[in-house]
Amino acid sequence: MFRRILIANRGEIALRIIRACQALGVETVAVYSEADQGSPHLREATERVCIGPGPSQRSYLHQEALLQAALQYSCQALHPGYGFLSENAAFATRCEQQGTTFIGPRPSTLRVMGDKVTARETMRRLGVFGVPGSDGLLSDALEAVRVAEEVGYPVLLKATAGGGGKGMRICRTPEELPRAFAQASLEAEKAFGNAALYMERYVEGGRHIEFQVLGDVYGHVIHLGERECSTQRNNQKLVEEAPSPGVSAAQRAEVGAVLTRALSALGYVGAGTVEFLRAPTGELFFMEMNTRLQVEHPVTELVTGVDLVQWQLRIAANAPLTLRQEDITLTGHAIECRLNAEDPTQGFRPAPGTLERFEAPAAWRGAMQGPVRLDTHVEAGYRIPTFYDSMIGKLIVRADDRASAIAQLRAALAQVEVEGVPTTLGVLQAVMEDPTFASGDYDTAQMAAMMRRYAAAHAADPEA
């Protein structure tokens, strides 16, 4: 095992990695920007080092600063967390070149899976099929119109380098496509530095399902079941649960077996998530692979009892994955909700500022196996910076069954008090009261519509 690692991230995920390292006896060096110098998570690290000003490009995305910090503090490895440089093949290569282990997949895998079109083609060759769509990238809007006629409307334009809902447009008629193509391409260029788009048939009533996988350097790959991530706002996840109420045990076993064979053939190493679109018919279509830890990994940890971050560290240190597929059982039901500093009545616009009050039972913090777990780095008095993601914490519960988990999360949310900035607390409570969500038979469009109704009602009457 490593003696010391650099954590190339911030906030909640940095604290999560620190806790896993503490459990394994690994020292940690936490980097921080000037905007994060007062972040409470820094107190937990062995060492701390400032890597630049607040803007991400000058700090958490500043590759030279991170690599220099790893060398200066004698770190054998670097954990990128999620976001920032976690899926950057060039950065992973630079880590390797200077002798710092990148805790994640090999650079070659990051390159293949980092481009969505290449990932689709690669997985198709390995027997994992995606939604019908374009054969590679679209050259221009005219080609998009031609391909759409073959695929059938409605269609979805997607950025090949993207994520988080950016560079995406739904088109229902040929007349919409040229303008949508220009908008999506421009948005993709601004967000990812890559304007390239591809097309998929838009599946009405679709659900977002993802499978968690782990693979070691010896070719052994397992899956840890699936998560349901269909409760989204602005194409970004807000509530996740495991297992999915829309996936049967038989389908889980079938899809999981196909995935593990494919990823073993690919030589996949580390933790990863394979994302699928579930059609109303129940068929699962491959969308993309996230070659990193996911924000929603705790729900998988709670139903499997597997610490994914500790296994990331072990695998990166060339330890064999001693877990067999038959060792993985899903017990009970877990639900996670993201508490964000956002204003639901203003289109979920980020709302940075000072948390004047942040109250929740202390026993929830760091409670890895629940029944209630709060993953957060914030406390009262913390100032949420303007430069980064709006999430201030994740509240996760586990119970014997789904109905009990919903009731437990509803009760837990009632015990959280936040003042000083607008948050998603109210809309999360509304989701837990929503009969469509409670039924388990819901899709992304239904839940997005539910949140729009909530936002409209509270914009008109804040006491509603």
Image (cartoon, helix red, strand yellow):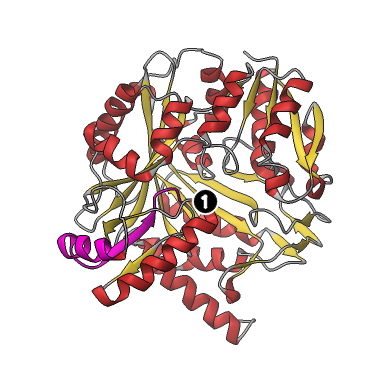
Give the residue displayed 41% in from the left and 51% down from the top.
402
Mark 1 neighbour class, 10 Å CA radius: few under 14, some 14 to 19, many 20 or more:
few
Against 59, is 343 above or below?
A: below
Q: Residue furthest left?
A: 150
Residue 156 image position (x, y, % from top left): 31, 62
Q: Residue furthest bottom?
A: 460
Question: Badge 1 is on which residue?
Answer: 193
Residue 460 image position (x, y, % from top left): 59, 87
Against 158, is 252 above or below?
A: above
Q: Quadrant of the N terminus?
A: top right
Q: In the image, is 22 to the left or to the right of 105?
A: right
Magenta residues, as a range?
142-162
Give the residue displayed 44% in from the left and 59% down from the top.
167
- Which residue is nearer to you in this view: 438 or 210? 210
Residue 446, quarter of the rendered image: bottom left
Residue 445 visible (yes or no): no
Residue 120, quarter of the rendered image: top left
Q: Quadrant of the C terminus?
A: bottom right
Q: Secondary structure at mark 1?
A: loop
Look at the image and say whether residue 21 sits in the magenta stretch: no
Amino acid under disc 1: Gly
- Which residue is nearer to you in this view: 97 or 129? 97
- Which residue is nearer to you in this view: 9 or 178? 178
Residue 10 image position (x, y, % from top left): 69, 42
Q: In the image, is 58 to the left or to the right of 179?
A: right
Residue 334 image position (x, y, % from top left): 47, 45
- Which residue is nearer to you in this view: 252 or 274? 274
